[in-house]
Amino acid sequence: MIAAPDRPRAPAGRFEVWRGNFWRSVIAQSDPRLRARLIAATFAMIAIIGAVDFASGFQLSLLVFYFLPVCVAVAAVGRGFGIVIAFVSVATWLVADFAAGAHYANPLVPGWNALIALGTYLVVVWLFGIVLGLHREMEERVRQRTAALTEEIAERERLERALLEVSERERRSIGHDLHDGLSQHLTGTSLVAQAVEARLSARQAPEAAEVRRVVALIEEGIEETRSLAKGLLLPEIERDGLVLALQELAGAVRSQYRVECELVCGDEIPAGGNGMATQFYHIAQEAARNAVRHGAARAVAIRLSARNGTVSLAVTDNGTGLPPSARRGQGLGLRIMAHRAALIGARFAIESPSSGGTRVTCEVPAVRPPA
């Protein structure tokens, strides 16, 4: 089974969105209100830890808990504010211990402990600042690459539309050449042959029967040329005319290729946009022609249905199945049909069922016109 890739992705959950917005605000330091709240929370945490430190006594050290306000300060404002909070944390720890009745035989002991704690906090500030800087750099690179990828996707879609527009213009140009050039030339040839046949019939020449056969073959060529020109010159299909257009397509396939071709349509098909109807028609046309020309199919079925809020088009045949180039995704017709489906946001797939033949499916969400 060969399927066109689905472009839209499912939206992230609420928790993931909240978490992403929170860290973007903290790391980028772009939300003044959040930064003010974090600054207030930093001093509140120092006050709470200092109160607990005082209540627990000087013998139980809570220096490790001051890492939390220090890290929050670096994330909220920057390294400078983190250094300030480091000094405030050490001062709070000393005040809480002395207020709790701490006594030291050597007055250098609390100073040494304070310097060790301050040095540890400053190392944490430096390392955490580096981590945040790397994170900001990575976020910026991701943003730039995302923007470049978005532009590349938009440019690719624009090129796809341009290619289809060029192909549409060339198709109409060929249709005009067939209708105004080859068809008129064959008509003139038929008139000349009919005049020759009339003169031979007047003389009762035996060659008159052969000339009549030539005239009949020319008339068949004229009909096939007009049928091809009509298919190439098909205008934009109105949203309510898809069923009628597919009926005419089934009739054209029957008369042109001498194979069975039927249209099976649901009771009610929601009206979609004009673009959907036109692309559905061209996909069905390409699939039916490929089935006869490349798959040697003797029967083709075109099914149009609506179910569960989607409009589905399926073209099945009893031919020889997918050719090797199509299995490798190299068939031009396959790529054209996949591009047409992508233009209307449809899911496209082509596969070889176990029963044989080929099945082409295209599904698009139903769009109802406003009341």
Image (cartoon, rainbow, N blue to C red):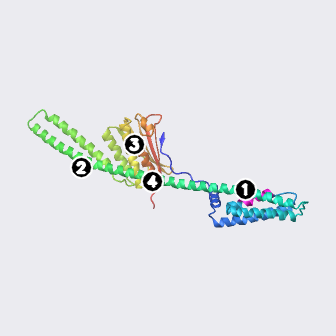
Amino acid under disc 2: Asp
Residue ID for mark 2: 180
Q: Earlier in the sequence, mark 2 or mark 3?
A: 2
Residue ID for mark 4: 155
- Specify few, some or many for label 2: CA neighbours under 10 Å numbering under 14, 14-19, or 20 or more: few
Q: Would you say residue 2 sits in the magenta stretch?
A: no
Residue ID for mark 3: 333
- Specify few, some or many for label 1: CA neighbours under 10 Å numbering under 14, 14-19, or 20 or more: some
Q: Would you say residue 68 sits in the magenta stretch?
A: yes
Foreground: 249 or 295? 295
Q: Earlier in the sequence, mark 1 or mark 2?
A: 1
Does residue 234 lie above or below 297 as drawn?
Answer: below
Q: Earlier in the sequence, mark 2 or mark 4?
A: 4
Amino acid under disc 3: Gly
Quarter residue 71 falls in: bottom right
Q: Is residue 330 left or right of residue 85?
A: left
Q: Earlier in the sequence, mark 4 or mark 3?
A: 4
Q: Earlier in the sequence, mark 4 or mark 1?
A: 1
Give the distance between the C-alpha atoms of the residues marked 4 and 1, in whole angstroms.
46 Å
**Does residue 366 appear in the picture of this structure?**
no
Residue ID for mark 1: 124
